[in-house]
Image (tube, helix red, strand yellow):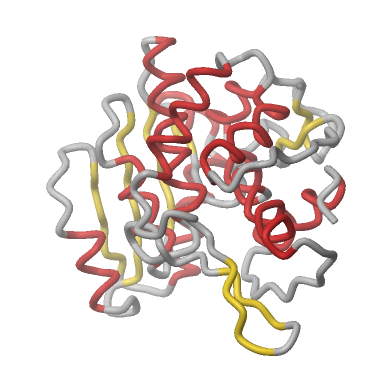
Amino acid sequence: MRYISTRGSAPELGFCDALLAGLATDGGLYVPQSWPRVTPLATSNYAHQAAHIMQAFVGDEIDAAVFSQLCDEAYSSFRHPDVAPLVQIGPEQYLLELFHGPTLAFKDVALQLIGRLFDHVLTQRNQRVMIVGATSGDTGSAAIDGVKHCSNVDIVILYPNGRVSDVQRRQMTTVESPNVHCVAIDGTFDDCQDLVKAMFNDAPFRDANSLSAVNSINWARVMAQTVYYFTALQSLGTKASFSVPTGNFGNVLAGWIAKQMGAS
């Protein structure tokens, strides 16, 4: 599988290079050249289903057995055995529970895997990167938890001082891993985001510090979120319409991509 920029002028990349790159050099987002068609496995094991569905995007860049093991490790940290259980709440109404991860945020579903993907690829290449991100709370907590045990990843999270919940602040600032760094900014979330964008737009600085990202600009975030649309439909056993609360549109985009892949 090859990856191209949404803006069309950055070089094509393979999966591992797209994973580490985050933004394309032309400012676009890396996406697959085409949407693979996938038939889900007849299994209720979320990690096995995830490995099967996402292998179409990973291709031969990561050995299938290794990728399956990374999925097993990522989803073993969830409190519910189904990872993303579908719960009926009314007549023909169901809730897809995405809060069973370590930080209680739906972003754990992708970030528990992405941290392990980063560390695996970087170990193979003998490289190290610095993830930089801005958060209003849940992204920072989930990103930090996803990489706190990584040997080849440093993470720097900017958050607006006094504008995140106390629980989220503690989730971010009480992690003792030496690769985790949180910075409180006197300003708004937009001010934090502007600082991060400035760092990524400064190409010499970005390259000198090996910057990378794990927010929704990173294809792997969206890729990992396609899985629970497949598992929800499989649990339901019929077609369904999804109502998705969205901020950066990554979560609902994953649902659209799952549909292109054959989820229905």
Nearer to us in this view, 170 or 193: 170
Question: Residue 87: where, in percent of width, then height?
Answer: 57, 74
Nearer to us in this view, 42 or 15: 42
Q: Residue at image x 78%, y 29%?
A: 4
230 in relation to 251, above or below: above
Q: Residue furthest top?
A: 125
Question: Residue 74: where, in percent of width, then height?
Answer: 41, 40
Nearer to us in this view, 77 or 157: 77
Question: Residue 27: where, in percent of width, then height?
Answer: 69, 40
The quadrant of the picture occupied by the C terminus is bottom right
Q: Is residue 255 left or right of residue 213?
A: right
Question: Residue 60: where, in percent of width, then height?
Answer: 65, 13
Q: Residue at image x 49%, y 62%?
A: 106
Q: Residue at image x 56%, y 14%?
A: 63
Nearer to us in this view, 65 or 116: 65
| Quarter of the image where one finds residue 21 | top right
Q: Residue at image x 50%, y 69%?
A: 190
Q: Is residue 183 left or right of residue 20?
A: left
Q: How many marks?
A: 0
The quadrant of the picture occupied by the N terminus is top right
